[in-house]
Amino acid sequence: MASSDSTSTIKTLMCYCGKEACLRTSWTNNNSGRRFPWFGDVASGCGFFVWEDPPMCTRAKKIIFWLLHKLNKIEEFSEMRNKVNLLHKMEEVAEMKKKVNFLHKCLVVTLILLRLMRSKVAADTLVDEVGTTWESGLSLE
């Protein structure tokens, strides 16, 4: 029975100065999808550079370029849709603020009317009491 080794070795790239690099992927038009060593924010001082992958054929470059173009269009559409949704939410909030403002004004007017009605009832009661006192013949002195 043959055994298969399922472990994979991770290739460590080192520049001429001994700095360890990680692999990054290029997305330029000429080298889309090709990996290269990345030494972080600081470039290797020795000028080390090598492509990890062989160059792609012209057809592969065109297909990757087209796919990237389509992906960018989808992302732009998604961003625009998010902005439109945000504008709709902002319009809804503005409309709700108008309604709240209107309801606040209605509440203030209602409270004023209630106070006026209350004072009118008090005034009518006072007039009724005075009138009743007058009619019963009692002196107000």
Image (spheres, rainbow, N blue to C red):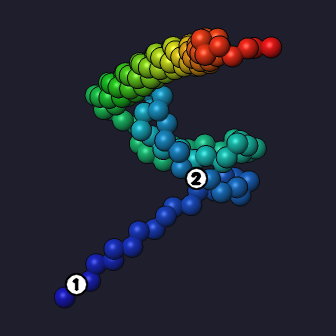
Number of callouts: 2
Nearer to the camera, 33 or 137: 137
Q: Quadrant of residue 141?
A: top right
Which residue is drawn at the image coordinates 58% and 53% (left, top)?
22
Q: Amino acid at mark 2?
A: Cys
Q: Residue furthest left?
A: 1
Q: Nearer the viewer, mark 1 or mark 2?
A: 2
* Mark before the other along the chain sequence, 1 or 2: 1
Q: Give neighbour class at mark 2: few <14, some 14-19, many 20+ (Cα, 10 Å).
A: some
Task: Examine the rendering and report whether any part of residue 30 can be seen.
Answer: yes
Residue 8 at x, y percent in the picture:
41, 68
Residue 1 in which image quadrant: bottom left
**Most foreground residue, 59 or 66:** 66
Q: Position of residue 34 (x, y in %)?
A: 44, 40
Residue 74 in the image: above or below residue 20 = above
Q: Is residue 1 above or below residue 87?
A: below
Query: Which image quadrant is residue 133 in?
Result: top right
Q: Residue at x 47, y 32 (%)?
A: 27
Residue where numbered disc 1 is placed? 2
Q: Is residue 52 left or right of residue 131?
A: left
Residue at the image position 58 percent from the left and 47 percent from the top: 37
- Residue at disc 2, secondary structure: strand
Instruction: Identify which amino acid the numbered label 1 is placed on.
Output: Ala
x then y, percent, for residue 3: 26, 83
The residue beneath circle 2 is: 22
Q: CA distance from mark 1 to mark 2?
A: 34 Å
Instruction: Tell me, for residue 23, which label it has, or none.
Output: none
